[in-house]
Image (tube, rainbow, N blue to C red):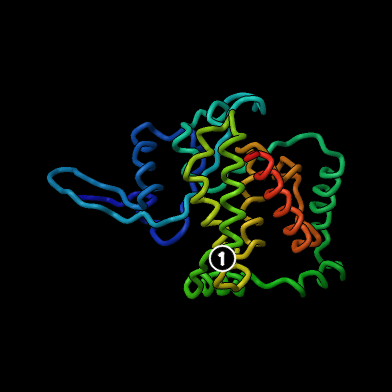
Amino acid sequence: MLEAGALVLADGGLCCIDEFDSMREHDRATIHEAMEQQTISIAKAGLVTTLNTRTIVFGATNPKGHYDPSQPLSVNTALSGPLISRFDIVLVLLDTKNPEWDEVVSSHILGEIEPQKAKHDEDLANIWPLPMLRRYIHFVKRYFKPVLTKEAEKVISSYYQLQRKSAMQNAARTTVRMLESLIRLAQAHARLMFRNEVTQLDAIAAILCIESSMTTSAIVDSVGNALHSNFTENPDQECILSTKFIFVEATHTCT
């Protein structure tokens, strides 16, 4: 009897894997195909078949000992470069000493103790409830198929070429898969913004997501730590500045 595993059961949904680095070698080899082709091939007891694994893989892992920022991610996590490159976003959350961030965290935790505050209720009134958010995401995923505009293509292409020329430590991450990740993230942002076209703003949003992961050499984002990063107050202005910066850097590199 053939029993489906976690990735097959999560087809069309989300599969969360904790302690990703503790997986057996056989499972790691299998997950390569599942994340690349979105299928798993099985040849067991005379049964040859292919099962769908069209799922989002959300993995969590701890560093191998103390995290060393000077070393590549594959060394710190003991995960192979090809496996890491199959993830669109790899967020490295470093608990560095930051007084401002510590104040934000402590204020948030203490605020949860008194949920009846009027300000708290006022803030919640402006936030979509979870069922509404789920319906919105389901709708845009089903009905929107964004296509890249020429402007977005130029931004993504210029940024990818910059990363290919500047990335030394994380060469395993800076592959064609990064280009595919940028396209997927830009399309996802366009859906979220209720658009059928991928604009420059969507491309810049995808680039900032990639850079906040700290798996590439930062070209646009100077924060460097996803745990301590914030949303910009003026995304349109930030998009214009980031686009100009990428084009200028690409021009200087070519010359």
Classify the position of the C terminus by image quarter: top right
Residue at 54%, 62% in the rendered image: 187
Q: Is residue 138 above or below residue 109?
A: below
Q: Residue 27 location, x and y as percent? A: 36, 38
Residue at 56%, 56% in the rendered image: 185
Judging by the rendered image, the residue that carries numbered circle 1 is 149
Q: Residue 3 location, x and y as percent? A: 27, 51
Q: Residue 233 location, x and y as percent? A: 81, 60
Residue at 70%, 54% in the rendered image: 243
Q: Classify residue 102 as left or right of residue 28.
A: right
Q: Secondary structure at mark 1?
A: loop
Q: Is residue 178 above or below residue 115?
A: above
Residue at 12%, 45% in the rendered image: 46
- Residue 116 picture quarter: bottom right
Q: Residues within 10 Å of mark 1 (few under 14, many from 20)?
A: few
In this view, which residue lies farthest toward the left? 46
Q: Nearer the viewer, residue 252 or 214?
A: 252
